Image (cartoon, rainbow, N blue to C red):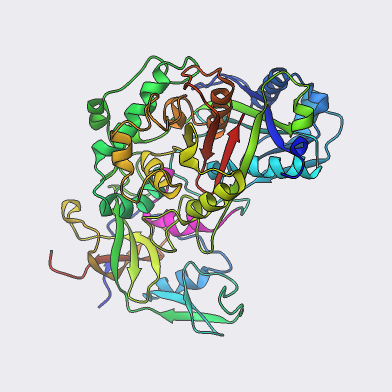
């Protein structure tokens, strides 16, 4: 059961560009994906028009496990983050597949936040009705 | 260098005052800084035939020529990557004058970064010009919208691995403010701080960045003139020879949002710059007499100190605490007060200070300066007498 958070009703919408729209479209469907190269099957994030490993332009969205580990976490409190009523916990997550994503962790007291925390994907609504992938703790705190 | 007369030298430096509100246009700040650099060098704006600035600068070579009567440019260009590009400008200027692309190159950065716009406030739109990488797109919906947030997110693994405390970062800020306090050109002239002041300053990005870990958004303009050594001999100042200036940028890295590649506790780009620069200049950064290290935020100082070889990984905090970077230490750090204490003209005011230290004309003059190291993450330069 995918968890949908509405904790920040004014959360900014994602910005769609030609090379990255597939990622956000998948998130709207509740899927957490990364670009996979059609030539050599390497996964990449952020997405890019050409695979830097084999130079193929063939690519598709690959579903990720949704499990990862927090590499870095912060809480921007001043100036207040645009679109957030309360300061978000911003994280850099490394997924099981070895890709890194900037995201949020919700459902944890900031005093219990730590690097190395195991997390799993959830989705958060944006002000325009889209969804973006965020994370929640995957372990007992 | 096969022909010593061909070697690039910084022969002129100029700057406006650094303020909260300059009260004039960025074009005017640009023109004033360049005029001051020409006056310092003993050159006329009519002698300039090469120009460069940052891709983020709002003035261009058309403005410069119209305002100052420069008759003809042979070369002009812009460098990307924000403040990381500050020392990169010296790489371009050195190659440009040594190759003969141009003879007298001016570098400028002029901005009303405090009164007209604030770099430190949340960025809520992807750059409409489509410049640079797409990094903002991956940060904005999650509330990572300021340089402080991006810096903190990339620095946290370093800080935690080596147990760097807020007090350790505070000592860097105290040192910058101590130097700024006796530099009449500094925004924080006469305003030193204590470690306690740092600790009491408000959180910007917990758990690591407080207000006094951040540089000072400022209005102002800075200009630098580079020419060849044979030409420099006829000019007003002792030339600052560009012994080496190198740039390195590696696969899958970004600038302030450098999250996606390798071990975040290391600055891979800076390590590469150090290797190249040491070979080019014939001496290593730590063998120079003054260190001008880009200080947008305090953690950046520690990571660069280690990457550029002043000390081993994790030892940066001790290197500072032990006094090695005090004015009377073996590697004095930014005697002008750095970007945290003097002003944040996107790194360029650290270059002019390096030149003053070499000339022996700085407000906080270090004794017996023969060489100065300056760096901004992806670029480094060593100047010498």
Left or right? Give the position of B317 relative to B268: left
User: Residue at coordinates 37% horizontally, 24% vertically from top-left?
Assistant: B177
Position of B220 relative to B142 (above/below): above
User: Residue at coordinates 25% horizontally, 39% vertically from top-left?
Assistant: B166
Residue that protrudes farthest toward the right in the picture: B71
Position of B324 relative to B83 (above/below): above
User: Residue at coordinates 55% horizontally, 76% vertically from top-left?
Assistant: A53
- Assess whether residue A49 is covered by the magenta stretch: no
Which residues, given as a range, are shown in magenta?
B132-147
Q: Position of residue B186 (x, y in %)?
A: 47, 20
- Assess whether residue B146 is covered by the magenta stretch: yes
Picture quarter with the N terminus of chain B: top right
State which quadrant residue B381 falls in: top right
Q: Position of residue B35 (x, y in %)?
A: 71, 21
State which quadrant residue A135 falls in: bottom left
The answer to whether residue B54 is visible is no
Picture quarter with the C terminus of chain B: top right
**Between B12 and A50, the one nearer to me in the picture:** B12
**Between B298 and B200, the one nearer to me in the picture:** B298
């Amino acid at each position: 059961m995918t968890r949908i958070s509405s904790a920040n009703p004014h959360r900014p919408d994602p910005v769609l560009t030609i090379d990255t729209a597939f990622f956000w479209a998948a998130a709207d469907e509740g899927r957490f994906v990364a670009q996979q190269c059609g030539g050599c099957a390497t996964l990449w994030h952020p997405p890019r028009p050409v695979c830097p490993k084999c130079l193929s332009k063939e690519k598709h969205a690959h579903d990720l496990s949704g499990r990862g580990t927090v590499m870095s976490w912060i809480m921007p409190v001043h100036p207040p983050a645009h679109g957030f009523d309360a300061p978000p916990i911003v994280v850099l997550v490394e997924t099981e597949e070895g890709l890194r994503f900037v995201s949020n962790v919700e459902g944890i007291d900031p005093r219990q936040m730590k690097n190395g925390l195991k997390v799993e994907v959830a989705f958060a609504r944006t002000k325009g009705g889209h969804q973006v992938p965020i994370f929640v703790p995957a372990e007992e705190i | 260098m096969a022909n010593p007369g061909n070697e690039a030298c910084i022969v002129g430096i100029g700057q406006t005052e650094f303020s909260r509100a300059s009260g004039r246009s960025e074009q005017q700040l640009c023109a004033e800084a360049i005029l001051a650099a020409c006056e310092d060098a003993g050159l006329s704006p009519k002698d300039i035939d090469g120009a460069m600035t940052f891709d983020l600068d709002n003035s261009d070579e058309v403005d410069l020529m119209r305002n100052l009567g420069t008759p003809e440019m042979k070369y002009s260009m812009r460098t990307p990557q924000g403040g990381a590009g500050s020392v990169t400008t010296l790489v371009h200027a050195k190659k440009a004058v040594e190759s003969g692309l141009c003879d007298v190159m001016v570098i400028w950065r002029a901005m009303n970064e405090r009164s007209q716009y604030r770099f430190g406030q949340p960025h809520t739109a992807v750059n409409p010009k489509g410049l640079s990488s797409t990094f903002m797109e991956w940060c904005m919906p999650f509330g990572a919208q300021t340089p402080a947030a991006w810096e903190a997110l990339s620095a946290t693994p370093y800080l935690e691995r080596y147990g760097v405390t807020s007090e350790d970062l505070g000592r860097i800020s105290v040192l910058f403010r101590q130097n700024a306090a006796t530099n009449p050109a500094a925004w924080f002239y006469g305003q030193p701080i204590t470690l306690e002041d740092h600790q009491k300053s408000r959180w910007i990005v917990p758990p690591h960045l407080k207000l006094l870990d951040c540089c000072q958004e400022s209005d102002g303009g800075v200009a630098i003139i580079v020419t060849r050594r044979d030409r420099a001999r006829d000019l007003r100042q002792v030339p600052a020879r560009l012994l080496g200036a190198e740039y390195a940028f590696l696969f899958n890295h970004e600038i302030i949002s450098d999250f996606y590649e390798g071990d975040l506790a290391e600055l891979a780009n800076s390590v590469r710059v150090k290797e190249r620069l040491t070979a080019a200049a014939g001496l290593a950064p730590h063998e120079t007499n003054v260190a001008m290290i880009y200080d947008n935020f305090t953690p950046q100082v520690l990571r660069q100190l280690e990457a550029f070889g002043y000390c081993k990984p994790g030892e940066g905090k001790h290197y500072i605490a032990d006094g090695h970077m005090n004015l009377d230490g073996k590697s004095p750090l930014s005697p002008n007060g750095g970007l945290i204490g003097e002003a944040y003209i996107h790194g360029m005011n650290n270059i002019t200070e390096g030149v003053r230290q070499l000339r022996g004309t700085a407000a906080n003059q270090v004794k017996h300066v023969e060489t100065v190291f300056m760096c901004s993450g992806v670029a480094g330069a060593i100047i010498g007498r």
